Image (tube, rainbow, N blue to C red):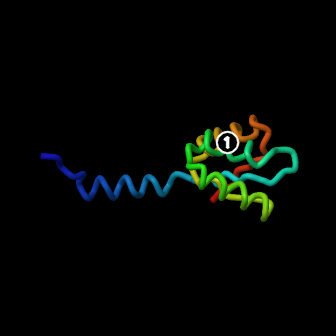
Amino acid sequence: MATQPSTKLASHLKQRLTLIPRFKVLLHNDDRNSMQHVVGVLRRVFRISRERAEQIMLEAHQKGIALCAVEPLETAELHRDQLVSASLTATIEPE
């Protein structure tokens, strides 16, 4: 029979997760990359559906910037660097 974590342990884990600072990964619009390229990069980097990648790409295209993810600093830095390596413009900022 599987056991559930104790309430004290679950509370401790929840508190610990809230203490980890999170950062937004932001995609900026540019005039250099095709929409197809942007969608492909987003799908590969974030492992998201084509539909979600298209939503992010269109938001960046229409508004100039789009939120890709909110995650711990090291993951956000990795994802930003992967986007930049694929010739996209991306930044991170605290949540």
x 78%, y 43%: residue: 88
Question: Image check: 91 left or right of 45?
Answer: right
Image vertical order of residue 65 relative to residue 42, above or below: below
Residue 33 figure quarter: top right
Q: Amino acid at mark 1?
A: Gly
Q: Quadrant of the C terminus?
A: bottom right
Where is residue 89? Give x, y as percent: 79, 46
Q: Which residue is mark 1?
A: 40
How many numbered marks does the figure carry?
Answer: 1
Classed neighbour count for the residue bearing mark 1: other residues with Cα under 10 Å, few (<14), some (14–19), many (≥20): some
Question: Image check: 68 left or right of 48?
Answer: right
Residue 78 figure quarter: top right
x 76%, y 39%: residue: 84
Where is residue 15? Give x, y as percent: 41, 57
**Hey, which residue is sitting farthest right in the picture?**
31
Where is residue 71? Give x, y as percent: 57, 50
Image vertical order of residue 39 relative to residue 55, above or below: above
Image vertical order of residue 49 relative to residue 81, above or below: below
**Hey, which residue is sitting farthest left in the picture?**
1
**Hey, which residue is sitting farthest bottom in the picture?**
63
Foreground pick, 74 / 2: 2
Question: Image check: 81 left or right of 46?
Answer: right
x 70%, y 50%: residue: 92
Task: Look at the numbered disc 1 and give the secondary structure of its residue.
Answer: helix
**Hey, which residue is sitting farthest top in the picture?**
85
Question: Image check: 11 left or right of 29?
Answer: left
